[in-house]
Image (tube, rainbow, N blue to C red):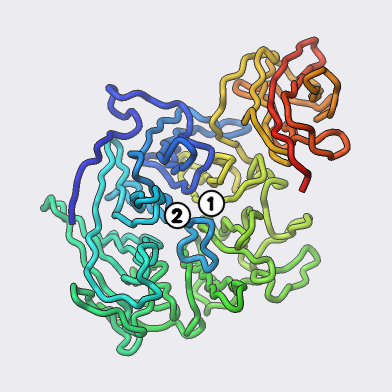
């Protein structure tokens, strides 16, 4: 095992380093509480590379305010996001695990690029701390693996758990079972031990060099520490297990033989949420289970707005959980569809899934204000916003980060913002080149509340589409544009794809201000 200070210092915490005042990218994959109240860590991976941001927030009268954003990039051949994060169909490697513990900072997996420049090679850990990043190579035991599990991704980190009493960081390592990382304050060299579940003897067995992984050693996908009993819980390919005594495990009978791919604990009263998932005949079959306030595990109840219960709703909706956050007796589940792009929050109360009046009656997404654009929700966390308020934050693939100070009733959206000037002095098209049914955002700023009309013209100034007409927009210190409406999709007024060429976008307000933007359409047929 090798411990080294990263070759870069992070985020301008030392005055000699430049400060980035925006997110690394709007394509964010994980979010976590930061080192102090009102701060958030954010992990991004976009076209320019991977990196992390630290956001400092304050709770205003009507919304959450951004005080600062400090960002920096990982080395070009490093990432905390692996390439198969959206392609896995049975959930164990779809998530981007992270964990915050004051002893360690924010912990992320470390992937290195392979010969094809794909991030599929598990390397170790990133520890993000106030003034530096520590890279930790996790040396793996040399063992004999079944042929179907001998790819590097089968040894990727699935989850973290921290035992604050013993100062152990537990790491779910897939086919390699469980890693125990211990940082001794008296020593500069941490220790690392590996264990595998043995379902024949109901034990946690040490995994040493030369060992062979057998069918009684199921892959481990998630891990958690019970906040009251301090027992270690293990989500595995063959069920959910609890370490009741040192290296002695007991199966949770309600989930016996289930392929448990996700495990989350928190809230008051305590909720334990479990996802089971298996691939059969080309279709993923998933279930969502919960123990509420010490009860036995039961499938989560999905009731509609008329209080009618729906059977098999979770599997029928084809959802998979990315992350869970807890505030009081509520649980917020970031979900996405398997092999799809539908995404949002599921909310659970003491009864089960909370419905709302919408076509996707359990999914709180862009229509509920959680996101400002149709994008995939990748993570959710709760965090101390101030001494009186627990905040809620989500990361997304394309829409940056959203933060709520009122348990999801209203949201503040934090994005990379190209500079625009007041009163339509400059218009930014993001991106400036699209194909038909793509999307280019129209960014502008107003110094006073206005009614705005946005129109698209061809190169010879023939109007091809009206985006909005006399739509109310508020003044804003950064942008006044509304991302859910102020965009062009490359189509004309009749829904037909515009021909390839340059198009001009005119933005007018009712105070006599006019601004122009420009975009290029590559054409294409409407799909």
User: Which is more toward the observer, 49 or 462?
Assistant: 462
Drawn side of residue 372 relative to residue 170, left or right? right
- In this rendering, is residue 61 above or below 323? above
Q: Quadrant of residue 498?
A: top right
Is there a contact, CB below 8 Å, between mark 2 and mark 1?
yes
Q: Is residue 174 shown left or right of residue 432?
A: left
Of the pair 467 and 381, the residue shown nearer to us: 467
Q: Secondary structure at mark 2?
A: loop
- Classify 36 as above or below 30: above
Q: Is residue 467 above or below residue 163?
A: above
Q: Nearer the viewer, residue 233 or 417?
A: 417
* Residue under pointer 1: 378
Quarter of the image holding residue 301?
bottom right
Q: Disc 1 on helix, strand or loop?
A: strand
Task: Please provide percent x and percent y for residue 102.
Answer: 31, 48
Which residue is located at x 45 percent, y 82 percent? 252
Residue sitting at x 36%, y 49%: 113
Q: Is residue 479 visible?
A: yes
Crowd tier of the residue under label 2, counting other residues whose Cα lies within 10 Å: few below 14, some 14–19, many 20 or above: many
**Which residue was labeled with disc 2?**
96
User: Is residue 233 among what the camera can see?
Assistant: no
Q: Position of residue 315 (x, y in %)?
A: 65, 71
Is residue 329 positioned above or below 369 on the image? below
Badge 2 or badge 1: first in the primary sequence: 2
């Amino acid at each position: 095992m090798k411990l080294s200070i990263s070759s870069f210092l992070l985020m301008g915490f030392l005055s000699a380093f430049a400060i980035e005042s925006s997110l690394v990218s709007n394509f964010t994959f994980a979010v976590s509480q930061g080192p102090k109240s009102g701060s958030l860590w954010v992990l991004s991976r976009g076209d320019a590379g991977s990196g992390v941001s630290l956001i400092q927030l304050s709770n205003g009268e009507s919304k959450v305010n951004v005080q600062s954003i400090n960002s920096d990039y990982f080395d070009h051949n490093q990432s905390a996001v692996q390439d198969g994060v959206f392609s896995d169909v049975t959930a164990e490697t779809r998530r981007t695990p992270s964990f915050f513990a004051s002893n360690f900072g924010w912990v992320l997996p470390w992937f290195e690029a392979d010969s094809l420049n794909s991030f599929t090679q598990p390397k170790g850990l990133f520890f993000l701390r106030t003034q530096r990043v520590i890279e930790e190579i996790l040396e793996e035991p040399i063992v004999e693996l079944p042929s179907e599990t001998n790819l590097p991704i089968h040894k990727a980190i699935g989850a973290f758990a921290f035992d604050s009493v013993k100062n152990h960081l537990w790491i779910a390592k897939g086919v390699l079972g469980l890693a125990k990382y211990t940082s001794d304050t008296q020593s500069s060299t941490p220790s690392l031990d590996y264990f595998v579940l043995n379902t024949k003897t109901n034990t946690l067995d040490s995994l040493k060099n030369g060992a062979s992984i057998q069918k009684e050693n199921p892959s481990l996908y998630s891990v958690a520490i019970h906040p009251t009993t301090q027992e270690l819980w293990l989500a595995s390919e063959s069920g959910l297990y609890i370490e009741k005594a040192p290296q002695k495990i007991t199966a949770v009978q309600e989930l016996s033989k289930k392929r448990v791919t996700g495990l989350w604990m928190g809230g008051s009263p305590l909720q334990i949420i479990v996802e089971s998932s298996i691939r059969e005949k080309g279709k993923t079959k998933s279930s969502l289970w919960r123990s509420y306030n010490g009860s036995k595990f039961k499938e989560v109840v999905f009731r509609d707005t008329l209080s009618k219960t729906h059977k098999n709703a979770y599997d029928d909706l084809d959802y998979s959980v990315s992350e869970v956050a807890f505030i009081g007796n509520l649980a917020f589940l970031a979900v996405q569809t398997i092999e799809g792009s539908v995404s949002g929050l599921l909310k659970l109360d003491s009864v089960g899934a909370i419905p709302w009046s919408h076509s996707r009656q359990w999914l709180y997404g862009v229509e509920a204000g959680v996101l400002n654009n149709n994008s995939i929700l990748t993570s959710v966390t709760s965090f101390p916003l101030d001494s009186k308020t627990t905040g809620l934050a989500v990361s997304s693939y394309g829409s940056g980060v959203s933060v709520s100070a009122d348990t999801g009733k209203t949201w503040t959206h934090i994005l990379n913002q190209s500079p625009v000037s007041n009163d339509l002095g400059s218009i930014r098209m993001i991106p400036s080149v699209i194909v038909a049914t793509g999307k280019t955002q129209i960014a502008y700023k107003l110094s006073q509340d206005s009614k705005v009309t946005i129109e698209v013209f061809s190169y010879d100034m023939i109007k091809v589409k009206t985006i909005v007409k006399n739509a109310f927009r508020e003044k804003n210190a950064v942008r006044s544009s509304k991302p859910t409406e102020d965009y062009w999709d490359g189509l004309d007024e009749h829904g037909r794809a515009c021909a390839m060429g340059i198009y001009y976008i005119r933005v007018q307000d009712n105070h006599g201000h006019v601004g122009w933007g420009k975009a290029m359409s590559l054409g294409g047929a409407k799909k």
